[in-house]
Amino acid sequence: MACKTKCVCSQLQQHRCKFQPVLPNILKKGPASVKAKTGKATKSVADQAAVKRIFPNTYGLPEISFVKGANAAACKKAVRVGVVLSGGQAPGGHNVIAGLLDGLKKANSRNKLFGFLGGPSGIVENKFVEITPALMKDYRNTGGFDLIQSGRTKIETDEQLQAAKDNLIKNKMDALVVVGGDDSNTNACVIAEYLKQQGVDISVIGVPKTIDGDLKNAQIETSFGFDTATKIYAEMVGNICRDVNSARKYWHFIRLMGRSASHIALEVALKTQPNAVLIGEEVLAKKMTLAQVVDYLAKIIAARAKQGKNFGVCLVPEGLIEFIPEMKELIAALNDLLSDNEAELAKMNTISEKKDFIISKLPAKLADLMKSLPAGIASQLMLDRDPHGNVQVSLIETEKLLVEMLRVKLADMKKAGKYNGKFSAITHFFGYEGRCGVPSSFDANYTYALGYNAAVLALNKCSGYLSSVRKLTKKPQDWECGGIPLTMMMNIERRKGKEKPVIRKALVELKGEPFKFLTKNREAWAVSESYVFPGPIQFFGPAEVTDMTTITLLFEQGKKRK
């Protein structure tokens, strides 16, 4: 494979380049053989009146399912379509673009696809490149977003929306495809609504992307990249499980990506069966304090030590801190205090002095909590603030916080005769390692279908829709395709002090089968070595190995034995 960077390609890259994704049967003959069947009008998941008021032109659209039928009209006119990658990377993004390109070219060889560079800012700044089959050839079935890069700009101000509209018109675009997560697809809906308000006939279509797994519902069964990323993390966690079972002397605390939901931690736990896994949604539901979380882990460590096992593996979701009610309350109070007392704090020379000052201003309960935190974590809470003046929770090393507090707790337990083990801990954060991996066969097929499906939506002049490919536990050729109105997934949330429409994040469902399986087995996993070693993603071999999807999805669709 001739890479644009002139690098020497691995044999795996060469073989993956030859991989031909399997299209759903409904799409195989191309857009000219696909008709859009409309269902009933829809409504948002919550706050219907408010969402309808904000999106009067795109609210209430019907669901669309694709069925077989002649549709020459959708292919007659040559069209120009733009695509943008928005937000964090996820394995399979290049195949979305490949599917989009192939769908457009299959409909009409004169159709053109353009990639906006660097994310949504590329639309505002009018930076783009034409994506030709020759250019696309080097990126099929590869990880990363390096073909056109990504970015986190939101097109939401009047000036940005005007610039985006002007550039889309100037470049004679007929459609724009936004590949992103919940926030990016909310932004896609904002753009679609704005264009309709302005009387501009340019369709806007979204594609569901996020490794976090929190963009899903009955119609969007999973976001792309989740399968590959969790397989990558599970390989690394499985390797560590095998290491502890060999060395038998360390506890490994592993923080996994997923700030707003614990889907990654749950899926990796189901794949590897570690001794402990914290699920943020459960911590929130039980209103657990930080001390109670530490107590829970200390009991597991003590129980294993009683068996002579001073080792184990614990998974921690990245967003755990924000799920602990008292920590969330403390962070909110710190945001206000740090902002209100900025000038006075600037005069202080040491962290200790600033910490004592802030503690003196906190309510007694929160002051005690702040005092209980390890010095390093307390400093992070004081110093690491974003451009809006808020504590950057994602930078807090939760796994190190837990280890430090466990050292204190276990020392107290030892003095009381309730623990007689040795506690040596190693911490890890697995995050960026999973975002740009070579997509699994599932994700390679899924993303290609999502892109091809988005092309069919664009050719049928659908706007305000999310590309939807369903029945994902079946073989790819049996997947169902269509479009889901973006407003259907919206509710109103408070963001940066303002009420805003956003696509609702899907949290771990505590009554769902994946979590129920965890609760049924975790006590046994805690004290035994029930570790599973998934190994690396398999690209070649029997279909039950190469094409397997997530355990979460199998449970949710009743395909997994309980």
Image (tube, helix red, strand yellow):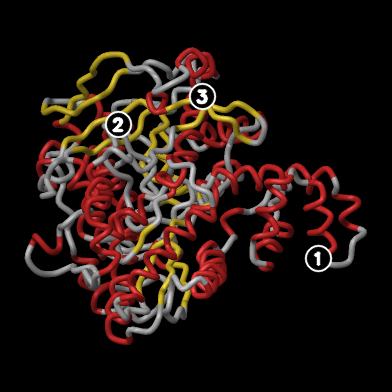
Reading the image, the residue beneath label 1 is 352
Amino acid type at circle 3 is Leu
Q: Residues within 10 Å of mark 3 (few under 14, many from 20)?
A: many
509 or 20: nearer the eye?
Answer: 509
The picture quadrant where one finds residue 2 is bottom left
Reading the image, the residue beneath label 3 is 195
Q: Where's residue 106, x and y in %?
A: 21, 42
- Quarter of the figure that contains the N terminus: bottom left
* Residue farthest along the front direction in this orientation: 417
**Disc 3 and disc 1: Cα gap in Å?**
53 Å
Measuring 48% from the left and 15% from the top, which residue is drawn there?
A: 52
Amino acid type at circle 1 is Ser
SS of the residue at dot 1? helix
Do the residues bearing badges 3 and 2 touch, measured as CB atoms within 8 Å? no
Measuring 41% from the left and 74% from the top, which residue is drawn there?
A: 252
**Disc 2 and disc 1: Cα gap in Å?**
58 Å
**Disc 3 and disc 2: Cα gap in Å?**
17 Å
Which mark's residue is nearer the viewer, 2 or 1?
1
Reading the image, the residue beneath label 2 is 457
Measuring 49% from the left and 75% from the top, which residue is drawn there?
A: 414
